[in-house]
Image (cartoon, grey):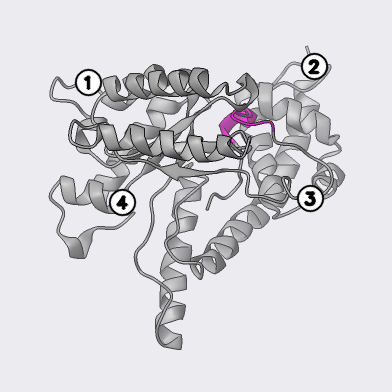
Amino acid sequence: MGEDGRRNDDQDQDCGDGGDGGRTRAEAAPPFNGIRCKSLEPKTRRRAIATIDAFLGALFENQTEPPSGFVFTLPKVTSADQVTAMTVICERFESGYGISRTRKLCFELQVEMPQLILGPNGIATIARCVHAGGDRLIGLHYGTYDYSAAVGISAAHQRLDHPAADYAKAVMQVAVAGTGVRLSDGSSNVLPVGSKSEIVAAWQSHSRLVRRSLERGFYQGWDLHPAQLVSRYAATYGFYREGLSAACDRLRAYAERAAAGLEEPATGRALAAFLGRGIDCGAFTEASVAARTGLHPVDLRFIRRTGRVPGSP
């Protein structure tokens, strides 16, 4: 469901060991997978814990650890205390089931409640949640329809590009900046089903929303129907391929100026990140970027991570 399958700023999470190379069964699996439990609100917290326990118990009956890239999704979060509690739950289950550090339990939050964006004390609760989760919190997902309903938007106007949605996502973006926690936009319930004209209209609408998310720095998103993958791939590939030539030209010029100490790291990092995400999603190849920029793939990854050109002052 994501567009590039990687964390922001090229920081790989260690919830599972992953792998490159041949197409084994494990490597052919999606990069991320997991289950959604109930919330840790008083009425559902026991069921949430029981769900996690039942799932892990079934895995270990077959002497299997959680698969690579596995995460729990925690919905309806309203406070940083719930995130702290989730980290404790993960620790206790790791200890109880003997889960290795390389497969440590991680989770992501569904941002569906307005209290998570702005608390009654005026504090951005989501920022506290990011730090309360530590290295176990790997992602934030915007919940389009639950959040919209919670702030009083009528059903006919609940959509990804509503101003209320933009505000919530802007706060999420600021909260995770520099932390390595990835962001995911919400879903669109305008499904590509029905007549040909209805399907095409839904694809056009979804494509526009995916493109809008990419332009605003949300590089992943949720989809509700398999046919939405058509418009997601088309919009994503188009976004990166349209920007390929200019980004490569700018990065090549940046590398030349950086060698003389005349550039700021933020510029190179942003350009390399754009190209890296395009490679990650399959819009173009490392070889094509190397040919256009004169940079080895290892150098591109170094710039993406640090903003510096190898060997520059």
Amino acid residing under circle 1: Ile
Compare residues 268 and 111 and report the one nearer the observer: 111
- Closer to us: mark 3 or mark 4? 4
Task: Give the CA distance from mark 3 to mark 1.
Answer: 43 Å
Question: SS class of the residue under badge 3?
Answer: loop
Q: Which quarter of the rendered picture does the C terminus lie within? A: top right
Question: SS class of the residue under badge 1?
Answer: loop
Please determine whether, in this image, residue 87 is positioned above or below residue 241: above
Residue under numbered circle 4: 144
Q: Rate crowding at label 4 as few (under 14), some (14 to 19) or many (20 or more) other CA atoms within 10 Å.
A: many
Q: Earlier in the sequence, mark 3 or mark 1?
A: 1
- Closer to us: mark 1 or mark 4? 4
Q: Rate crowding at label 1 as few (under 14), some (14 to 19) or many (20 or more) other CA atoms within 10 Å.
A: few
Residue under numbered circle 2: 312
Q: Which residues are magenta?
A: 7-17
Q: Which mark is residue 123?
A: 1
Which residue lies at the image location 16% right of the left edge and 54% below the top edge? 153
